[in-house]
Image (tube, rainbow, N blue to C red):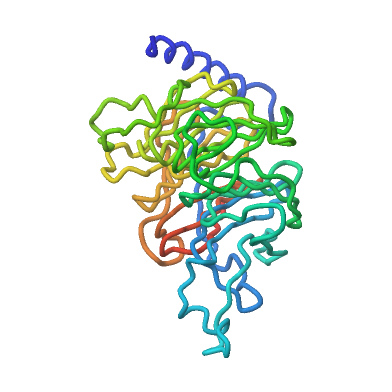
Amino acid sequence: MRTALYLVALALLAGTVACTTTGDSPDAAPAAAPAPKHRIDAAWPKPLPNNWILGQVSGLAVDSRDHVWIIHRPLTILKAELNAQQKPPRSKCCVQAPAVVEFDPDGNVVQAWGGPGQGYDWPKNEHGLHVDAEGNVWIGANDPLDGHVLKFSRDGTFLMQIGKAGKSEGSNSRTQLGRPAHMDTDLAANEVYIADGYGNRRVAVFDAKTGAYKRHWGAYGGIPNDEKQAPFSPTASPSENFIPAVHCVRLSRDGLVYVCDRGHNRIQVFQKDGTWVREIFVERQTLSGGTPAEIAFSPDRAQTFMYVADGPNGAVQILTRADGKPAGSFGRMGAMAGEFRSLHNIASDSKGNVYTTEAGNGRRVQKFVRE
């Protein structure tokens, strides 16, 4: 049954892509377009002001003005790196940067904010950031006691919380999340899609204005379950369930929902109602699992290419979105400019430039200019 659905959905998808890549659209890329090339901009961003230093950078977004937003984990900064914050100061450097930082296209810091406040539960471990079409900033979290996402205005004014601090109530809860990793929004429908997450095994959809529950689904569009699963094996049959972490969710212009099932080295594609369309494996033979941490799309109208942050292999994989086939890659494992340690997030701007962030020991944001 699933095979038949797969073939039908794939045929429908192929028809959709054909419509969006031909015709009179001046900026639609041809089906056989070569993969974009990128080079590191080692001078971006500019040095942080105020003697700031970043911890693990765990979330990234580019807004409608091509401003770049990150969220990092201030509590992961080593005490020895915060000597200027000690009383009395032990050396000239450094102090924690606020958790949320906004950069302009030239790499200058525009503003920064974040942390505990009245009326909401600030995360114990910040994870994932999304800026919607209205400029609101959504924040996820993945500590075992982070069961919620937060919504703020651009200047950091608290607007709404979905879920609450505390343990997951399971993958079929309508009120509580389970270490939610990432968000995307469909403001035409007033909906927020949540990759839920490190504890739960689903995509959950809520009203973006009120926070009311709408729907959820698991792998292949089924009902998620929280039973113990076998460890990932690249030679095993594809799992019928997501396994932690359900690490990203991204909506394409043609109405598809892309979900990073990081534990299974795959991306699953759905319609907005949860109907399964297909799956794409990313470097499937990587034994550690974890290859699709996050995805971004090229800026042409058809979103011809998909950029995948592949942490275990230290590379950005470039796939053709129509068929999921590899088209190129850039980067390698390492600590130098243009290399990656713990590659975690990826985003693109209107010019086709690509941005990445690194958690773990990487702790930075980088820009790759489209050539």
Task: Name the quadrant containing residue 242.
Answer: top left
Vertical relation: 165 (above or below) 175: below
In the depicted structure, whether residue 310 falls above or below residue 2: below
Residue in the foreground of this view, choosing between 68 and 248: 248
Where is residue 80, by image quadrant? bottom left
Please, is residue 243 above or below residue 119 in the view?
Answer: above
Residue 37 visible somewhere in the drawing: yes
Q: Position of residue 94 (x, y in %)?
A: 56, 80
Q: Residue at x 36, y 24 (%)?
A: 240
| Residue 341 in the image, given as x and y percentages of width and height | 40, 60
Number of on-image labels: 0
Horizontal side of residue 157 vs 221, given as left or right? right
**139 or 22: nearer the viewer:** 139
Residue 210 spot, x, y in % from top left: 73, 35
Q: Is residue 354 left or right of residue 341?
A: right
Q: Which residue shows up at 52% across the image and 79% down it? A: 82
